[in-house]
Image (cartoon, rainbow, N blue to C red):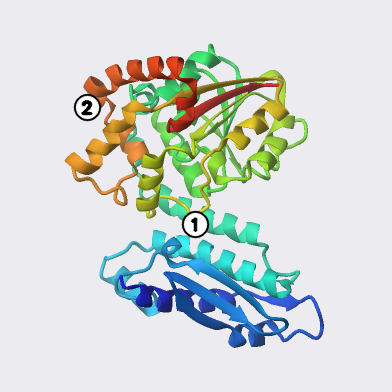
Amino acid sequence: MAKKIKFESFKYRFLIAAQATSYQAENINHPSWNDFVRSIEFSYEKAEAHIAWQLPSPGHLKFPLDEARFYLRGDSEKEVVYQQETGLINSEDPIKIKNDIYFKEIVMRVAESAGYKKKDNVQTLHDERIQVEREFHDAWADSEDVENIDVRAANEACTSPEMRYITQRLGNLKGKRLLDVGCGLGEASVYFAILGAEVTSSDLSQGMLDATSRLAKANNVNVKQHVASAEDMQLPPDAKFDIIYAGNLLHHVDIKETITRIKPHLAADGMFVTWDPLAYNPAINAYRAIATDVRTPDEHPLKWNDIKLFHENFKNVETKYFWLSTLIIFVIMVLAQRRNPNKERFWKVVVHEGEKWRWLYTPLEKLDRLLLWLIPPLRLLCWNVVIICKA
């Protein structure tokens, strides 16, 4: 899409988001929010959209056009309806959902810079993001036939090294109280229940929780549901768990806030277990830049300072790194098999196809162990890290 067309779509989406949100001036002499929006000037320069205003005082912000995605046939509500009716996009369109989050954030930044704040009766940006995230994951859950998921294969596949390691470290789970934070479709929740744990599955998406319950029923186990975001668990103060598990979750949330909210619910001698992607591998970052349709825009893979937060909050912290030379599998999927990273969630597919990749993954996993032992700094170039904490 031509940059000029992207700029016009950017301008349109910003105005739609600004008009759908109510702000009030921090100073009574400021123009009303609607008058302020009408006075905004837009310009295009070097693949960036520039937003400028003169009142209440001169200000200017700029945003890269490539951080938003736009429809090939335009971005108006009419085009959205057209593409839905013709089957070009689903009713819960991921591009629209992600852009809702993106442009609300831009409007918020402009408002704060110009001296405007949310009205008291309007949702905060955090609440808006939670709502949009919930809608995104509800739609994802509705698109999945969870009853056909092979739970044991999903957690024991050779290409699921994180879960194999975690299960080994947790040991006997029979009778253990386990909280799965951000359970998603429930593969881990149900697997832990199969192994004997008393599982509470938590997610901000009721659709995901319902999918987890269906998956549990299909595997003849029970899990409890708890609707909440990781940053606000809304659990009773006396709710305690022997194990709190957060799989592939923390890079979506405020890590420090989530640790603060979760830690009080860890029983004495309990374990907090998490695994998430790291931020440093350039090949993975190239994939992330491409695979925008199957990811949410709030993702922030872990950096070294994030890992240090665990050491600051727990006495005993253990880390284990996975996927270095084994990442060649994803290169083969893209270059040799010509698979579209915006049509498939590669991190899910590689687990489902574990047996197909065993011939390559198994020897490369052994190579990774050797490389990471010989050259420890390579750990930060891995894809994922498992972090196991004890209070």
Is 372 positioned to the left or the right of 84 in the image? right
Question: Which residue is pictured at 51% across the width and 67% down the height?
Answer: 63
In the displayed orientation, state which residue is furthest to the top.
172
Mark 2 / mark 1, whichever is N-terminal: 1
Q: CA distance from mark 2 to mark 1?
A: 34 Å
Which SS class for mark 2? helix
Residue 233: % across, % down: 67, 41
Residue 135: mark: 1
Could you tell me if residue 173 is visible in this image? no
Question: Which residue is pictured at 48% across the width and 73% down the height?
Answer: 49
Q: Of circles 2 and 1, which is in front?
A: 2
Give the vertical position of 134 relative to 102 (above or below): above
Give the vertical position of 275 relative to 318 (above or below): below
Quadrant assignment for the N terminus? bottom left
Residue under label 2: 356
Residue 120: % across, % down: 76, 69
Q: Quadrant of residue 251?
A: top right
Residue 180: % across, % down: 56, 32
Amino acid residing under circle 1: Glu
Disc 2 crowd, CA 10 A, few/some/many (<14, 14-19, 20+): few
